[in-house]
Amino acid sequence: MEIRERADGRIRILHVTGKVTRVDGERVLRARIEDLSDRGYKRIVLNLAEVPYMDSSGLGELVRCYSSLRRESGTMALTHLSPRLVDMLRITKLGDVFDTFDTDAEAVLALSGMES
């Protein structure tokens, strides 16, 4: 799994590429988000357009990262979800937890209105 980062003001957009599974990258994602949070970036957009597969461990990691950010008055939004991931969020009722958007621009606009 690979993560490319770009900035939009105080919001960080992470473009995730590859599988998000216990074997392929859940620790990489956690480490990157923890690093951003430690550096004061508490509003993060995860662009998942190039994630072909996410298992339950990967989904659990999304929840852990989101919860960690929320404890520090931050938040995380998800963009470019595949139909499979949309179904996973719906089935697990996590669709009510995560803010999801079609585009990064929509997510950034929504997160820009939140306090830092």
Image (cartoon, rainbow, N blue to C red):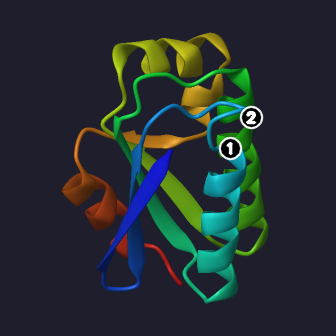
Side of 11 relative to 71 (left or right): left
Q: Nearer the viewer, residue 57 or 63?
A: 57
| Residue at figure coordinates x 73%, y 32% from the top left | 22
Q: Hey, what amino acid is under mark 2?
A: Gly
Can you tell which of label 2 and label 1 is closer to the viewer? 1
The answer to whether residue 71 is above or below residue 18 is below
Q: Are marks 2 and 1 in contact (CB under 8 Å)?
A: yes
Can the viewer see residue 113?
Answer: no
Q: Position of residue 103 (x, y in %)?
A: 22, 46
| Residue in the picture at 58% in, 76% down | 42
Residue 2, given in percent of the width and then of the height, sits at 45, 51
Instruction: Give the quarter of the image for residue 108.
Output: bottom left
Position of residue 46 measured from the top left corner of the image (x, y, whole percent)? 44, 52
Residue 88 is marked as none
Q: Which residue is mark 2?
A: 60
Cα separation, mark 2 vs mark 1, equals 9 Å
